[in-house]
Each structure stands twice: as structure tokens, then as C-alpha cells.
Image (cartoon, helix red, strand yellow):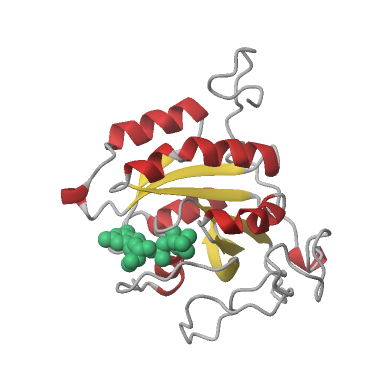
Amino acid sequence: MPRGWPGDASGAEFPAPPFLSLPREDCRAAPLLPPRLSRGSPHPTGQALGTRGTRRDRGRGAARCRWGRPADTSPAPALQVMLLGDSGVGKTCFLLQFRDGAFLSGTFIATVGIDFRNKVVAVDGVKVKLQIWDTAGQERFRSVTHAYYRDAQALLLLYDITSKMSFDNIRAWLTEIHEYAQKDVVIMLLGNKADVSSERAVRTEDGASLAREYGVPFMETSAKTGMNVELAFLAIAK
Ligand SMILES: Nc1nc2c(ncn2[C@@H]2O[C@H](COP(=O)(O)OP(=O)(O)OP(=O)(O)O)[C@@H](O)[C@H]2O)c(=O)[nH]1
């Protein structure tokens, strides 16, 4: 049990994230691959780096799923954001709704490894480039995503309001974040699929209460209708 987390008897408090003081770095200076992974070397899953395709070919010219980091040629300061949460909570749809304003319904195909998209937003008149990493929620890709945690400056942690299990797993996700991410990483908890109120399995107040317990901001969202999607990204970019 990490110190300061709920259940920890040491009495230390889990620090609330420094919401308004995000470190910004020009990601052109960042290494293309995490130190533990190098292009051409075998991946933990047995896959060579940079060779894997994404689960979806959306045909927008964006980069596909890759194990390495994207090259960045934009002069805007970059903020690296990771989407985390169980498989099927809607991370990919959330990202695509934000970037393209579209919702992809239909057959669910799980993300393989990590995918990324960029979007430039204006925050108080300043352009900020969000480099958003969409991670695979499936357990078998966990070792892949761990390698990326430390470079993330902000994390959007999603559960599905129609899935009690995805909500119950949030504690495990937060423990993992505490273990692998930077200490000052900004975290926001999101209850996604708020449009499906007839199948709701997690009350809004339970989401808010869990977020309070961990000292992180919270909101419910819908990748389908777009509710609070942009707001969530803008809040972490501030
Ligand atoms: N009604 C509704 N359905 C959603 C919403 N977001 C995602 N879905 C559906 O939920 C399913 C899973 O969505 P994904 O975005 O692929 O889930 P994911 O979290 O990326 O899953 P992994 O890639 O396995 O980690 C898809 O069938 C989506 O159409 C939402 O806000 N509302």
C-alpha cells in the first residue's frame, strides 16, 4: 500500500495534483523511445517496436498505433496526456470525439498497445499542443503502458458508468498510477457513457466521492454526445 493512499495507516495524505502548474516541455527534446525500449528490439509482447498496426484504420492520416514516440515538429508547447481505464470504457471514442468531433459506434475492437493523436488547443490565448496517448485497457498490455506513464503530465482516468467493475477497478488504476507516474502528474477521473442513463450502474455521487477521496477532479462525460469531452481536456491543459 503506497503511503498516503486510502487504506494507508501512516496517516499521510495523498497530495492533490497541482492543477494550475503543469510543467510544459517541448517534446522535440524528448527521446523517441523510452530507454527500456528501442526500435527493432523485441517488445515485451514479442513484437518489434514500431511495427504494430492500430486496431482501427480511421483513414484520417493520423499516426497509427506504435510503440515508439511520435515525432513532433510543432513549435507549440506540448502537454502529454494519457487516457487510462479498463478495456471498453470508451477511451478511444473519447479521444476521437475530442479530435474529430465524431463518435464511432458499432463493433468494439480493443486497442492494441498504444496509439496517439495530437490536437492544438488555445488556453487563455496561448496555443498548447496536446499529445494524447490512447492506451489499451486490456491487462495483457499493461507492461507496455507502464513504460509511458512517467512521461505523462496529465492522466484522464475513465470508467464506464454502466459498468460497476470498471468503477471498482479505479482504485487499482490509481495505485498503478502512483507507482509508475510522476509525482506531480495531473489526474482527472471521468465517468464516461453518461448518455446511457437507463443502464447506469454507478451513481454520480459515488464517482464524486471516490474522486474526493483521492483528491482529484471529477466529471461525467459522453464520448457519444460529446458532453464534457472538450471541457475535460481543457481543464487538464490549464
Ligand atoms: N453509449 C456510449 N457508448 C460509448 C461511449 N464511449 C464509447 N462507447 C462504446 O463503448 C465501446 C468501447 O469503446 P472504446 O472507445 O473502443 O473503448 P476503449 O476504452 O478504448 O477500449 P480498449 O481499447 O480495449 O482499452 C464501443 O462500442 C463504443 O462505441 C459513450 O460515451 N457512450
| Residue at image location 41% in from the left, 53% down from the top | 231
The reply to whether residue 238 is in sight is no
Name the residue nearer the viewer: 82 or 39: 39
Q: Quadrant of the N terminus?
A: top right
The reply to whether residue 193 is in sight is yes
| Residue at image location 46% in from the left, 82% down from the top | 58
Name the residue nearer the viewer: 34 or 103: 34
| Residue at image location 44% in from the left, 52% down from the top | 232
Q: Is residue 182 left or right of residue 126?
A: right
Q: Position of residue 22 (x, y in %)?
A: 65, 46
Q: Position of residue 62 (x, y in %)?
A: 56, 81
Q: Position of residue 33 (x, y in %)?
A: 78, 66
Q: Quadrant of residue 205?
A: top left
Q: Is residue 59 left or right of residue 163?
A: right
Q: Quadrant of residue 8?
A: top right
Question: Can you tell me which quadrant of the image ligand 1 is in?
Answer: bottom left
Q: Quadrant of residue 52?
A: bottom right
From the viewer's perspective, is residue 77 above or below residue 228?
below
Name the residue nearer the viewer: 199 or 204: 199
Name the residue nearer the viewer: 222 or 34: 34
| Residue at image location 30% in from the left, 74% down from the top | 106
